[in-house]
């Protein structure tokens, strides 16, 4: 286990390899580093997280080929039902800034979304509101075997997130299995995002991804190194670039984890900015995000270790499904009809 913060990087990078391998001393030491990062800014970078470079490189190559397909072929994978976090969504059709109640233009990207690979619909059949959270996937199967690669990536993220949540539990002075029964039927979303060179100047305030906080417990993110990148807003108001090295993952907390920890840990605003040379071929950018959403019926209530003596929870108890539904509804405000 090691912690690094290069001179040109303000987000802490943590080597989690020994902790993930089960070294007890490394697990406690890594949990302490995670706690510091989560209380400070809510962002960290993972080294030796277990996802292979081969798999991530294959993902970027194969999804780039999908985004190069003619528009009508991509549109075949657009969802037609109420489950909007599935399949392909075209360029400039969604806007994350709406989740912050900002009347910003739509995001300058196109995306493919996957939901849970395991089928939990029967288990949640008694909760009608859970229907869209566990809807079947609509996964592009071209070119090549893209659908198989996307499922493999989802599974790898699933395991990495479970491993990391054990360290989160230790960081919160809880048994490391605390989150296990809260994620065994999760409805996490994987977003495969493509930011093409901008075909025209953006509207005022229009970004590749508008400023927002994430919805769920946490996000794991892999990105390429193209211009026009990821930025986090520090407490002093500065927007700070976050640029992981090849093979590293960015982790940021979501609103649900902030709520769970009574604001002890932070869900931080972030965005994807436009490149300086908006139309340059080298500005084409891709990212891969796994948005960890616990089981739909998990109660999100203040964790006892996050309450000081005499302190009361800042938020009422809510289920994970209710929390995510509120955020998703906002993200579609002002979007084109789907």
Image (spheres, helix red, strand yellow):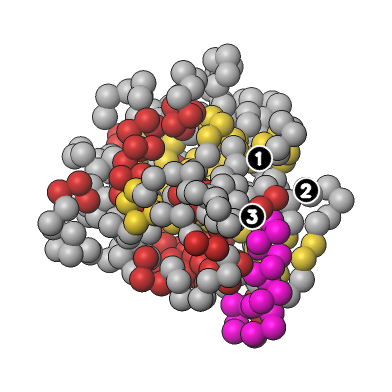
State the image quarter where residue 173 is shown: bottom right
Q: Residue at x 64, y 55 (%)?
A: 38
- Between 253 and 85, the one lying in front of the other is 253
- Between 65 and 32, the one lying in front of the other is 32
Q: Are marks 2 and 1 in contact (CB under 8 Å)?
A: no
Residue 23 is situated, as x and y percent measured from the top left of the image, at 64, 85
Q: Left or right: 228 with respect to 254? A: right
Taking 273 as reference, is 268 above or below it?
below
- Between 89 and 277, the one lying in front of the other is 89
Q: Is residue 20 visible?
A: yes
Q: CA distance from mark 2 to mark 3?
A: 14 Å
N-terminal of the pair, mark 2 or mark 1, is: 2
Taking 202 as reference, is 185 above or below it?
below
Part of the protein shown in magenta? 19-37
Residue 84 is situated, as x and y percent measured from the top left of the image, at 29, 40
Secondary element under disc 2, as helix, strand or loop, is loop
Q: Left or right: 161 with respect to 113? A: right
What residue does disc 1 label?
Answer: 232
What residue does disc 2 label?
Answer: 10
What residue does disc 3 label?
Answer: 38
The N terminus sits in image quarter:
bottom right
State the image quarter where residue 326 is shown: top left
The C terminus sits in image quarter:
top left
Secondary element under disc 1, as helix, strand or loop, is strand
């Amino acid at each position: 286990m090691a912690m690094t913060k290069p001179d040109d990087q303000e987000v802490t990078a943590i080597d989690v390899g020994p902790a993930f391998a089960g070294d007890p001393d490394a697990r406690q030491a890594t949990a302490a580093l995670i706690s510091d990062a989560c209380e400070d800014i809510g962002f960290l970078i993972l080294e030796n997280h277990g996802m292979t470079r081969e798999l991530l490189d294959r993902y970027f190559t194969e999804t780039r080929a999908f985004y190069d397909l003619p528009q009508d072929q991509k549109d075949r994978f657009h969802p037609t039902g109420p489950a909007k976090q599935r399949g392909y969504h075209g360029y400039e059709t969604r806007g994350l800034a709406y989740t912050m109640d900002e009347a910003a233009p739509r995001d300058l990207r196109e995306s493919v979304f996957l939901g849970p690979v395991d089928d939990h619909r029967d288990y949640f059949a008694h909760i009608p509101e859970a229907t869209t959270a566990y809807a079947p996937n609509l996964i592009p199967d071209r070119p090549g075997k893209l659908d198989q690669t996307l499922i493999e990536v989802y599974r790898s993220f699933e395991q990495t997130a479970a491993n990391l949540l054990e360290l989160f539990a230790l960081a919160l002075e809880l048994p490391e299995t605390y989150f296990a029964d809260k994620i065994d039927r999760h409805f996490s979303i994987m977003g495969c995002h493509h930011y093409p060179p901008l075909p025209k100047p953006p509207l005022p305030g229009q970004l590749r991804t508008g400023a927002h906080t994430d919805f769920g417990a946490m996000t794991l993110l892999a990105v390429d190194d193209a211009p026009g990148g990821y930025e986090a807003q520090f407490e002093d108001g500065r927007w700070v670039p976050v640029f992981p090295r090849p093979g590293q993952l960015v982790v940021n907390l979501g609103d649900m984890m902030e709520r769970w920890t009574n604001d002890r840990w932070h869900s931080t605003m972030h965005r994807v900015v436009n490149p300086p040379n908006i139309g340059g071929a080298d500005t084409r950018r891709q990212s891969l995000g796994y948005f960890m959403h616990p089981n739909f019926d998990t109660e999100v209530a203040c964790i006892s270790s996050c309450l000081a003596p005499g302190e009361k929870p800042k938020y009422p108890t809510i289920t994970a499904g209710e929390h995510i539904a509120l955020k998703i509804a906002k993200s579609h405000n002002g979007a084109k009809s789907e």
